[in-house]
Image (cartoon, rainbow, N blue to C red):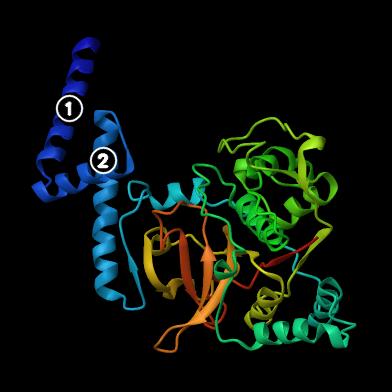
Amino acid sequence: MASSIKIFALALVGLVLVVGVLSHTEDERAAWEEFKREFNKSYDREEDQRRMEIFLDNRRFIESQNRATTSFKTGINHLSDLTTDEINKSRTGFRMESTPANLTSEYLFETLLKTLDMTNFTDESDSQRAWYEQLLTQPELDWRDRARVSRVKDQGDCGACWAFATTGALEGILAARGRPILLSEQNLVDCSRRYGNNGCAGGLMDRALSYVRDYGIMSAASYPYTAKDEQCKARRNQIVMRARGSMRLPRGNEALLRVVLALTGPLPVAIDASYRSFHSYKSGVYDERLCKSASKNLNHAVLLVGYGTTENGGDYWILKNSWGRSWGEDGYIRMARNKRNLCGVASYAVLPIV
């Protein structure tokens, strides 16, 4: 009797799969097969059917979103066979602290002046002063144009966005010094737990910078990324950079964030990246209406590399993600600026001190 029930159950599962396959149009099946070829995806029969359903649901969302939105477009990418929950669990990783930044704007500027050596200008440094003034007044800035931004990386199925945002900022500082070295995210994933980070389960950029202050950081070539938690393998004799610490900027001040970005270089920031429209972002200026008051729901760390204004007068930030180049604008997103701190972009910004 038990054997008969088991056979019946298996037959029923098979029938459901067959009906599911037959219910899809030729165009839908072709789109799914093309997606798997493009992104090198492979599943067993049952999982293939489930992933196809998710993919087609995301495809319908993208088509609907593009009909309704004018400021940005969404599109198929390597994440299109994942659910929103799956992406939020495995592809983000910022774990918000409840304590706000304890900094005043005056203290921050005083520290910046000392860091940049702007307090004692001489006649010989007029050109340096002019350069800083130009940075502060120019309507657009893109640190990629100044070779201060390293290549786009992919964190994979590991919540290590905080590590990628941290290394991105430090790599920009090294590049400014004439040392374009890719730094090791895995070093931070494996070794900064004593500072409160949790590897692939999430962490914070300032905690990572505290680790770099005390122990330094290795290069990506010496300590390659594996997208999983492992034992710390740091080697003191292979350290390529140290930091003196970090400061967290006052919360929610986009004007101040722009100034600090212009004066110092790329900055690690946290955003709310939990929306389906973000996961499938393709191009344009991201202005998700659901994200307008999301500064308390930060879940993803990215690297702020610039700002600008569209021909239609729309201000935007330029953010470098860690989801590979098939996402967004070759791995980047332009996010609406001066829109009441959209997606919390100015809610948790960290300034590395080196």
Q: Name the amino acid type tagged 1.
A: Gly
Residue 25 appears in the picture as rendered: no
Question: Is label 2 in a helix, a strand or a loop?
Answer: helix
Quarter of the image with the N terminus is top left
Tell me if 121 is positioned left or right of 283 in this view.
right
Q: Earlier in the sequence, mark 2 or mark 1?
A: 1
Any mark on residue 72, and which? none
Quarter of the rendering occupied by the C terminus: bottom right
Judging from the image, what secondary structure is the residue with disc 1 in?
A: helix
Frontmost residue, 188 versus 243: 243
Label 1 Cα neighbours within 10 Å, binned few <14 / some 14-19 / many ≥20: some
Residue at horizontal 47 percent and vertical 63 percent from the top: 332
Kindly identify the residue that appears in the image at 53 percent across and 54 percent down: 151
Is 134 on the left-hand or right-hand side of 239? Answer: left
The residue at which mark 2 appears reads as 37
Instruction: Name the foreground residue: 305 vs 74.
Output: 305
Task: Residue 34: give x, y in percent of width and height.
Answer: 22, 45
Residue 191 shown left or right of residue 308 in the figure: right
* 2 or 1: mark nearer the eye: 2
Q: Position of residue 36 (x, y in %)?
A: 27, 41
Amino acid beneath label 2: Arg
Task: Kindly report the distance in space between the C-alpha atoms of the residues bearing marks 2 and 1.
Answer: 25 Å
Q: Position of residue 72 (x, y in %)?
A: 36, 73
Residue 7 visible here: yes
On the image, which quarter does residue 269 sit in? bottom right
Number of residues whose C-alpha sits closer than 10 Å to that of mark 2, classed few (under 14), some (14–19) or many (20 or more)? few
Identify the residue shown where x is 57% and y is 46%.
159
Q: In the rendered view, would you say 157 is above or below 176?
A: above
Seen in the picture, residue 24 relative to 43 is either above or below; the reply is: below
Residue 137, given in percent of the width and then of the height, sits at 64, 89
Residue to which mark 1 is pinned: 14
Q: Quadrant of residue 304?
A: bottom right
